[in-house]
Amino acid sequence: MTHAVSPAREAASPTLYGGAGTRRITVRDLALAKERGEKWPMLTAYDAMTASVFDEAGIPVMLVGDSMGNCHLGYETTVPVTMDEMTLLSAAVVRGTSRALIVGDLPFGSYQEGAVQALRSATRLVKEAGVGAVKLEGGERSLAQTELIVQSGIPVMSHLGLTPQSVNAMGYRVQGRSDEAAHQLLRDAKAAQDAGAFAVVLELVPAELAAEVTRSLHIPTVGIGAGSECDAQVLVWTDMMGLTGGKMPKFVKQYANLRSTMTDAAKAFAEDVVGGTFPQPEHAFH
Ligand code: KIV
């Protein structure tokens, strides 16, 4: 269903990509973008400098994802990521940005015990790191956590479909292919919305099902491997910039090849040093 947006509300809400950069994007801006039918991009970020580049590029929402486990900290999965690591890196991303809404992931083990533990973890990310919202995995199974965090004044993004923190139980494969799984995904999405979530990430979900979820919710869906009908799209920045090594999943579009650019630059530096051509007189102090 589309809603009419009054001119006054429109003026208060910047276009998410390419809009004015005078204040931080809020979850309310995302709600208004859904009403306008405006799509928006989200990227992960794990450090201040990279985040500042994306902020300057106009990326309106950044996720300090627990993908930092595999993409930044050298773990094999997201599972080992701790609250200390999440807090440290989220604070860096907040410091590196002035416009983007920063969403901090609640890592595995920081909310599964129940609503009170979840609120404690979310509060820490808001108070110590300065994030504007948190993300957690699960719809119906994380209902109590989502409700309490939202009621306490912290916006929650929900994560459905493939939920990497459950990799030991579900592996990495497309979710929602059977009728029962599709119905469960729809129930989870509605449960997240009813609990007060401001957006829902859909990871590795068939495009038709993601489109149905998107149509049936009034909050935005953020797709990753979930087709083109979602309200927003997210990619892991090291994947889409070609920094991550190895084979990329089918849903990743590579916009740069930083791995080969950096390898070439490192080799050129090494060869200059070994060959005695760096530094030159202009690089020295006399
Ligand atoms: O941690 C992460 O980067 C994520 C995205 C894949 C949505 O959860």
Image: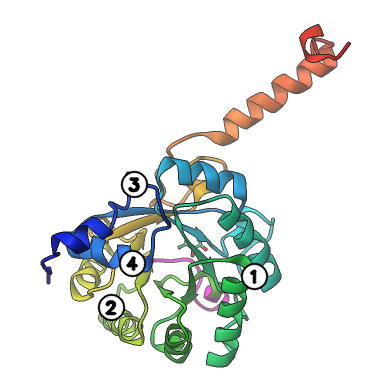
Q: Residues within 10 Å of mark 3 (few under 14, many from 20)?
A: few
Furthest residue toward front: 8
Hey, what amino acid is under mark 4? Answer: Val
Numbered mark located on residue 205 in the image: 4
Label 2 Cα crowd, 10 Å radius (few <14 / some 14-19 / many 20+): many
Looking at the image, which residue is at 53% across and 91% down?
115
The residue that disc 2 covers is 182
| Nearest to the observer: residue 83 or residue 96 | 96
Q: Amino acid at mark 2?
A: Ala
Give me the residue at 69% from left, 65% from top. Answer: 85
Q: Secondary structure at mark 2?
A: helix
| Image disc number at residue 20 | 3
Identify residue for label 1: 128
Q: Give x and y (percent) for residue 127.
A: 60, 73
**How far apart, in angstroms, are the residues tagged by discs 1 and 4?**
34 Å
> Quick one: label 1 or label 4, which is nearer the N terminus?
1
Q: Position of residue 176 (x, y in %)?
A: 32, 74
Q: Which residues are magenta?
A: 166-175
